[in-house]
Amino acid sequence: MKIRYSQITITPGNPAKNYETCLAVARRAKAAGVNLLLLPEMSIPGYMIGDKWEENDFIDDCEYFANELAKEADENFSLIFGTVAFLESIIGKPVGGYDGRKAKVNVACIATNGSKQFRIKALLPNYREFEEPRHFFDQLSAMFHSKDLMPFQPSEICGVKFGVTICEDGWDDDYVFKPFDRLSDQGAEVLINISYSPFTAGKNQSRIRHFSAHASKLGKPVIYVNGLGLQNNGKTIFCFDGSSAVWNSKGELIAHSGMYTEEDVDFEYVDGNLTAINAPQLVQTTEIDDIHKTLIYGIRNYMAQSHLQRVVIGASGGVDSTLAAALYVEAIGKENVLLVNMPSRFNSKTTIGIAERLAHNLGCWYTSVPIQESAELTHRQIDGLKPTNANGDEITINLSSFNMENVQARDRGSRVLGAIASAWGAVFTNNGNKTETTVGYATLYGDVAGFLAAIGDLWKHTVYDLCRHINSKAGKELVPNEVLTLKPSAELSDNQAVDKGLGDPLIYPYHDRLFEAWQQWWNHASLADILQHYLDGDLAAYLNHGEETELTEDLIRSHFPDAKTFIADLERWYKLFKGMGIAKRIQAPPILAVTRRAYGFDYRESAIQPYFTRKYLEMKERIIGE
């Protein structure tokens, strides 16, 4: 028996286009003598399309195209693919869903000669970016309406029994269902998991270990097929990386498709095992390389979906804008990227030189638009302004040096970059990293602006790692090495002179890990936990979370020699994280997700005031009496 999985690109919310893709793949498989074709979860509708699921006409179209695709099955060819359906279409009687909506299910359609079977997804994820219970019935809920919908029954094709699961079902080891175990107990000879799972750094290695363990424990081969694509949920952009794979009955990985590549992979099933015919092998990569590929794929496809071709990048000579420039040039071509350096009197010759050299290294467009004159004009127009009201009362508006820092940032973004982008038929980028985004270390309508935050899910240390990776991969200096040694600085005042070693108030080796503990750990670190570890002298080990990093206890003590200074810094950034940082994130552009907790649709938050627990306040009072 010849089996093929096809790793295809799925377009969210376009069943007509997806049907054409699946149809072409199915006919190609039939011509190649394939007996069973496997396609990803949600191959017809696409995935993560929000309340589009509540449009009945859309579901009608999905059912129509799924039925048309199923007609390709004949006596020699079967196919299994993911789609969505009304529950009543499967059981033959109306079923009301939540709030009077028609009940819908995420299903695998098993199309054989003249018939269709459906396997309903048993476990509906409701964490991170997923919210399937909002829209779908699970297997258990469906069974209440029809006892015929027995779960975890193998399907026989060409005399072989296949156990079909959908995405989350393949990860259920401890829950009541345990689909793989049950399917195996019911006689399944091959276990299948059709999935549509977005990229998260490190997840592929976890997936390989997980399914390998299933195969070896049950003594059954396992096929995992994932799709490709991009989904924009308004505040977060998710990339679906593929990385489909197959394990034999010993749990050995015998095929592994690459990230972001469309592929047909064939196997022969003989005597209880699978033998690869044309199987690609796993290419060992590093996590930083996987992140790099994802950023390039995300940028390129997001721009294509948005019908955008050109970008303008504010190139300060700092590491963030430098990385952004290198990524965009690789993703969309040097001819479509324009770097703009916008110096004021606070910008050093060092960073101006880095920006110009970067453009030369990348081969893209470059220009300089000084902003000192316009910043001074704003100061002359606003400083000393005396507004009045109807009673003749008068107030005076004065611009502080801090206000003038914001004036410069807004002048660069809203005025200069906005105007150039408009004139060039382009958009301008947001170059903020995750560390700065966490505490709102950016100016509203200035560097918070932009059409896409391509590096908004990268901690500062990852920004540096990616710059080094890009140079290593290129075999030459695309990113000027000098940018990797300079102290990061906004260069908006005399207190931020990089040539004097002055710059940002963030101590990145420490604050990176601190903010990550607040935001990205599954169990968020509390202020009380952090303070206790500081007092115990093992805070660096706690924040490093088992990794080797630049953060050491000596570094922490050098900046915070006593508890009072440590607490002041801790509360400063926590208040911003839970206060102004949220206000700025609400207005920021969408972030391209690579970590397991990206801001936006992934990391859910509420605009509430910072809250200090009793435990923390009691510790603080005991230590410093405040």
Image (cartoon, rainbow, N blue to C red):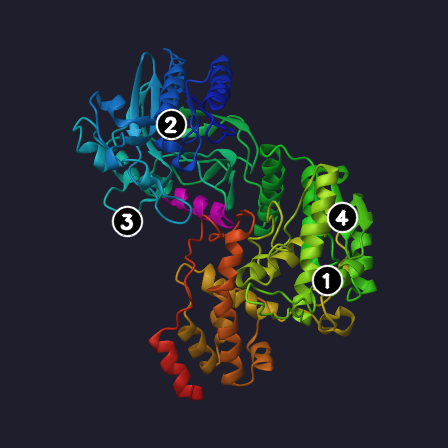
Q: State left or right for residue 129 relative to residue 488.
A: left
In this figure, which residue is indicated by the disc labeled 1? Answer: 381
Q: Whole-percent x and y of residue 226?
A: 46, 34
Amino acid type of the residue that numbered disc 1 sits on in the rendered structure: Gln
Q: Mark 4 points at which residue?
A: 339
Bounds of the magenta span?
Answer: 199-213
* Numbered tag placed on residue 83 in the rendering: 2
Residue at image x 56%, y 36%? Answer: 260
Per the rendering, the mark at residue 256 is: none
- The residues bearing labels 3 and 2 have C-alpha atoms spaced at a distance of 27 Å
Q: Name the outermost residue toward the front.
A: 391
Along the line of sight, which residue is nearer the eye, 454 or 168? Answer: 454
Q: What element carries label 2?
A: strand
Camera-nearest residue between 477 and 283: 477
Residue kind at label 4, given as amino acid type: Leu
User: Which circle, 1 or 3, is nearer the viewer?
Assistant: 1
Tell me if mark 4 has few (under 14), some (14-19) or many (20+) residues whose alpha carbon lies within 10 angstroms of its own.
many
Q: Disc 2 to disc 4, how far (Cα)?
A: 44 Å
Front: mark 2 or 4: 4
